[in-house]
Amino acid sequence: MRLDHVSTYYPIRRGILNRTKDYIRAVDSVTLNIYPGETLGLVGESGCGKSTIGRTMLRLEETHEGRIWFEDEEITRLSDRRMKPLRTQMQFIFQDPQASLNPRQRVGDLLAEPMHAHRLIEKGAIAEEVDRLLELVGLPRSSKERFPHEFSGGQRQRIGIARALSVKPRLIVCDEPVSALDVSIQAQILNLLQDLQKELGLTYVFIAHGLGAVRYISSRIAVMYLGRIVELADKNSLFDAPRHPYTQLLLQANPVHHPQLRSRPKTILEGEAPNPANPPQGCRFHPRCPYAQARCRKEEPQLDGGAHAAACHYPLW
């Protein structure tokens, strides 16, 4: 998948006539490549646009500007009829498995419904496929007779994963799939996702707040701030030598368990993120950046090329 200067804006309406007065720039001119078989991690503060990018990739949100390609076909403005066969190739795993599962349906019906809708296999084979999916995500076949509320949070997320797999996708956007789970259960779900990726050849976009989970599962990581990607690199380069000050401050805010590292001085990320409807002139991070200079307040930096890219006039190395 490829995004070329993609922007997703939400209108701000005011007045008796409910007219659009401005826009919240949730995603602002993002260019990104997602390669087959990789896991691209997306990290950043709440409200930076991570989930909006994921939804925009799958055309769950419409773009304000820019273009989107999926396997060499531009899908930016495809009609619902032309998008339908592509929906099976692109799926979404939601943050809250309880809210994403219909409480009135049994698990077997939840998993069978996408197969009926897309007519992927014959009706007589759907029951067998449901059993296979349950076993694939580590649940007994008897689970299909139960309702979602009868399962734990980790089990419900396994059901959500099975539902995403029911249409045999190639790309899955995982929107903070472990953030609502206990730490021990998080590890189980992450391992399950990795095993499924190896077995089925899946491509993931993994959205999360937890840097530990992102580092564990991702091959590359994109750091977002106020609707833009400010750093993009493979996970080892990004964690070992971050180039953007925002990335450095995010890593320093991550809990450290080693007693010798815990005593090292840290720079605190101060202040709140600016209003996305009215981003600062120049570098969007400059009001909170400890290294900001005059150029940062006037000229907006672009994400440079190369394997380790950073949108900063004065990168850290």
Image: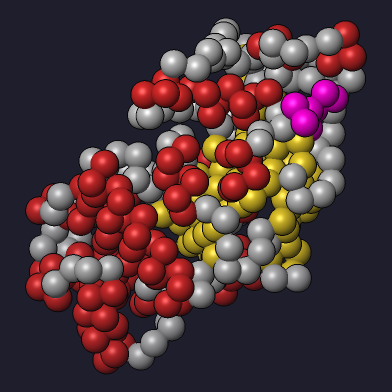
- Is residue 120 inside the magenta stretch? no
Quarter where residue 115 is shown: bottom left
Q: Residue at x 70, y 71 (%)?
A: 71
Which region shows up in magenta? 311-317
Quarter where residue 286 is shown: top right
Residue 203 against residue 4 in the figure, above or below: below
Q: Residue at x 72, y 50 (%)?
A: 32
Q: Quadrant of the N terminus?
A: bottom right
Residue 267 against residue 44 in the figure, above or below: above
Residue 106 against residue 288 in the figure, above or below: below
- Is residue 314 inside the magenta stretch? yes
| Residue 76 appears in view | no
Of 99 and 209, nearer the camera is: 209
Q: Quadrant of the C terminus?
A: top right
Residue 156 as seen in the image, left or right of residue 219: left
Q: Position of residue 251 (x, y in %)?
A: 53, 29
Q: How many marks?
A: 0
Q: Residue at x 89, y 14 (%)?
A: 295
Q: Position of residue 222 (x, y in %)?
A: 63, 43
Of 145 and 266, nearer the camera is: 266
Of 55 and 152, nearer the camera is: 152
Residue 119 as seen in the image, left or right of residue 80: left
Magenta portion: prevailing SS class = loop
| Residue 233 appears in view | yes
